[in-house]
Image (cartoon, rainbow, N blue to C red):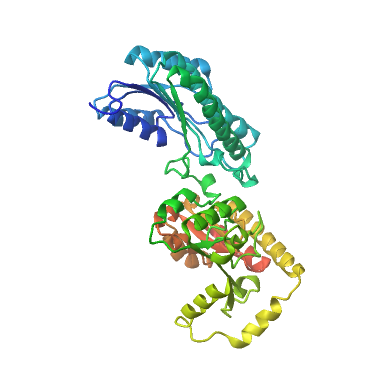
Amino acid sequence: MAGRMAGKVALITGAARGQGRSHAVRLAQEGADVIAVDLCAQVETVPYPMATPADLDQTVALAERYDRRVLAVQADVRDPGAMGQAVTAGVAELGHLDAVVANAGIAPLGDRGVQAFLDVVMINLSGVINTINAALPHLSAGGSVIATGSVAGLLSNTAGPANGPGGAGYSWSKRQVADLVHTLALQLGPRGIRVNAVHPTNVNTDMLHNPMMYKVFRPDLDELARAITGRTRLILLNSPHNPTGSVFTRAELAAIAALAVERDLLVVTDEVYEHLVFDGEHVPIAQFPGMRDRTVSVSSAGKTFSFTGWKIGWVKATPELVTAVKTAKQFLTFVSGGPFQYAVAEALALPDEYYARLRGDLMAQRDLLCAGLSEIGFEVYQPQGTYFVTADVRPLGYQDGVEFCRNLPDRAGVVAIPTAIFYDHPEAARSHVRFAFCKQPEVLTEALRRLSRLTG
């Protein structure tokens, strides 16, 4: 087959599934023969199912559709000897080697112990080194080495406590991969061998779509940048975020602010949960360089003072932007609760101790509900802020959150909200439901007692 890789042979690790499979199939489509390497076994600290021999066989079948030769090898990138044997066997079978894609990786997020740190470093970093070391004797001028990094390795804030030791190891190892590639490119350039890294983020694979990854809801800043066109005028931002409970980090907000300044966009930011942050900090985006004159900050008494029925809120912005907001609002509502506004003005003068007590009480209620839901069998995504908890119902035998919530009042006398209704792509949250913990502890305890009937 004619193509950009016609007559070439490519080695790919982590080839059984995900990005590795995609690389193998694409390179075969471009005319390359492929050495497809994968562990095809479970690493104990990894919380999601890893690739199997059947997955590797499927990769082979997909690549062979393009009439290319594919040698499948089950080998562990942590083992230099095994990788050497895999490459030697591939070169003996296919004749030579022209390109290496060191792609194998794991992301064991959550509380998996220090062993998770060691496992991810051995696979994501040592595995890259072992793969390149095994391949280099067979590469000549014109050859190419590509290592899979990650945007996580380019950020400074991805090794937080919620990610656990494995998350810390993931970020650290991906940073080292970036440094390795930079240094190795300088060493191999004189030999005519190219060395590059790709740094993906939030790729639609099994590594991403698993409960531990869902525990850390993060914005895809690359997708945000791609979504902005010449017609875009403003960014809508919500942090602390409903329904996920995530709180945007300072680095994430700085990136969004820089994007807004670069593209000359306004930012309307919903900060109604600004005082309900339990992990991390609330950082107003208006404080970043260039943002004061382009930010409209929205907040509400409904969340901070538990007056949801009063419908009293406020905006903060430059006089010109406030005038624009008032112009738009006059066509949305004729009048708000005048007497309530005086009450809220008094509440806004409350001392800091009020907010600290509110936050402490809600954190205790969050911990009570999260622990109880976990004990019942839900997969719980503990929120950093707001007063909502997202839980996955699949461990209880359900697949659809809407169906679960429709049946829940009859089955348990408890009400939940299916979070799929908040999503542009509902399938991403099909099995997720939202519970509120802005209730007295005895109410939450009774709710948990009733929910325990689901597994009784």
User: Residue 409: where, in percent of width, then height?
Assistant: 49, 67
Query: Where does the N terminus fall, quadrant-wise?
Result: top left
Question: How many numbered marks appear?
Answer: 0
82 left or right of 373 in image = left
- Residue 320 place in picture, x, y as percent: 54, 74
Q: Visible in this render: residue 376?
A: no
Instruction: Give the quadrant of the C terminus.
Output: bottom right
- Between 431 and 264, the one nearer to me in the picture: 264
Nearer-the-camera pick, 90 or 2: 2
State whether residue 406 appears in this view. yes
Q: Is residue 292 above or below residue 13?
A: below
Nearer to us in this view, 139 or 293: 293
Q: 327 above or below 249?
A: below
Q: Give percent across and percent down for residue 307.
A: 62, 77
Residue located at (41% from left, 51% from top) = 226
In the picture provided, is 347 more to the left or to the right than 253? right
- Look at 43% across and 32% down and name the residue there: 51
Question: Does residue 275 sit above or below 10 in this rendering?
Answer: below
State whether residue 317 is above or below residue 232.
below
Q: Residue at x 55, y 49 (%)?
A: 215
In which image quadrant can residue 407 be found?
A: bottom left
Q: Residue 454: x, y in percent? A: 52, 57
